[in-house]
Amino acid sequence: MEDAIRAVVVTVSDSRHEEDDLSGTTLVGLLLSIGAEVVEKVIIRDEVEQISRTLVDFSNRDDIDLIVTTGGTGIAPRDNTPEATLSILEKQIPGIAEAIRLKTMEKTPTSILSRGVCGIRNRTLIINFPGSPKAVQECFDIIKPILLHAINLIKDKKVHH
């Protein structure tokens, strides 16, 4: 599977553990369903430094094309994923986050409170998803059609527009 997307799932939570990480598990299943290889799945605390360090470490690896985070995107005091992600991005891709908020708002009005961001670091696509399994499914459905195309562009592979 040379063209398979190689992904990492990062669950950001102060309370989740492997046995109750429904959002991360849902995301792994969705990635596998499109033929992606999930290289790693981790759960980390909702602390800016830990999130930033985790994103930098994974984006520095040559075997990772995509990092998807779940959790920490809301407006509660302990929601730090967007700040941590913005601090390490080389380029933002605001259209992905905007599309996610716009489309999910049709089903869940409170989704406009999500502050998730998207961008690139070291030719790795990084996307923040909210922390509920339902939101993960809805967000993934929105990005699924453009995911491989975006990664191919980031990796500077030939693509047909």
Image (tube, helix red, strand yellow):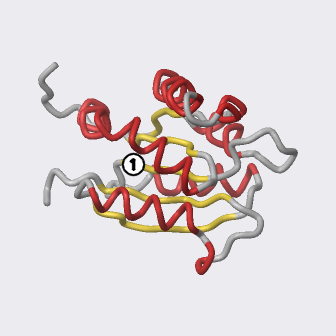
| 45 shown above or below 96 | below
In the rendered structure, the answer to whether residue 5 lies left or right of residue 111 reads left
Q: Which residue is drawn at 65% across and 49% down?
A: 52
Q: Quadrant of the N terminus?
A: bottom left
Q: Is residue 37 above or below residue 160?
A: below
Task: Report helix, strand or loop for mark 1.
Answer: strand
Q: Which residue lies furthest to the bottom in this view?
A: 19
Q: Which of 70 and 33 is in front in this view?
A: 33
Q: Can residue 91 be seen in this view?
A: no
The residue tagged 1 is 66
Left or right of 62: which side holds 134?
Answer: right
Q: Which residue lies furthest to the front in this view?
A: 107
Q: Which amino acid, mark 1?
A: Leu
The image shows residue 41 at horizontal and vertical percentages of 48, 67
| Residue drawn at 77 percent across, 65 percent down | 14
Q: How crowded is mark 1: few (under 14 residues within 10 Å), some or many (20 or more)?
A: many
Residue 38, by quadrant, is: bottom left
Q: In this view, does 2 lie to the left or right of 60?
A: left
- At a point 55% along the width and 28% down the height, the residue shown is 106
- Front residue of 7/54: it is 7
Q: Relative to 139, is 146 above or below?
A: above
Report x, y in % for residue 56.
55, 50
- Residue at coordinates 45% horizontally, 35% vertically from top-left? 120
Q: Position of residue 88 (x, y in %)?
A: 60, 39
| Image quarter of the C terminus | top left
Can I make out residue 5 in this image? yes
Quadrant in the rendering for residue 47 = bottom right
The mark tally for this picture is 1
Res. 27 image quadrant:
bottom left
> Is 145 or 154 nearer to us in this picture?
145
Residue 77 coordinates in the image, percent (x, y): 87, 45
For residue 86, above or below residue 132? above
